[in-house]
Image: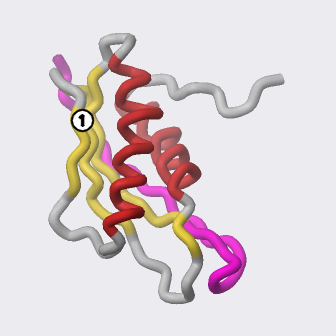
Amino acid sequence: MKNNSTISSNKFFLGEGEGGIYSNITIEIKKSEQATINRGANIQLQDEEILRAIEKEFKTNWIERYKKDEIYLEIIILNVGIDPTGRKYKVDNSVGGVMHDALPKIGIQPPQIFGL
């Protein structure tokens, strides 16, 4: 099996302060012999609740989805950045955005976002 990995990031900021939302995530992803999700050692964000929500989003909506088709993804969360202005972290958009960027880089077609 070819184990090419790629590093992808998703970063956006909308609104200001507590009324705003943001994403700032960097992952390393590759096809593997088994599906795993791990954290890197240098994650800026230290909010355990958000980090667990991010891991759950990767596992339930991406890893498990592709595992059904016998595609095993190994994902390492390299960083989740912080926003000093107090914006709320947008987990689903963050994970979805980074996966739609990363999957084609390792030869996997991501699911269609919009239908006609």
Residue sitting nearer the eye, 57 or 25: 57
Examine the structure image and report whether residue 112 is included in the region drawn in magenta.
no
Residue 41 image position (x, y, % from top left): 16, 65
Residue 18 appears left or right of 62: right
Note whether 62 is above or below 80 in the view shown.
Answer: above
Note whether 47 is above or below 27 in the view shown.
Answer: below
Q: Quadrant of residue 36?
A: top left
10 Å neighbourhood of mark 1: few (<14), some, or many (≥20)?
some
Quarter of the figure that contains the C terminus? top right
Residue 81 appears left or right of 4: right
Residue drawn 62% across the image and 70% down it? 21
Say which residue label 1 marks: 74
The local secondary structure at tag 1 comes to strand
Note whether 33 is above or below 8 in the view shown.
Answer: above
Q: Quadrant of residue 22?
A: bottom right
Query: Which residues, given as a range, are shown in magenta?
Result: 1-22
Residue drawn 20% across the image and 70% down it? 42
Residue 62 image position (x, y, % from top left): 42, 32
Q: In this view, which residue lies farthest toward the right?
A: 116
Residue 56 image position (x, y, % from top left): 38, 44
Residue 104 appears left or right of 39: right
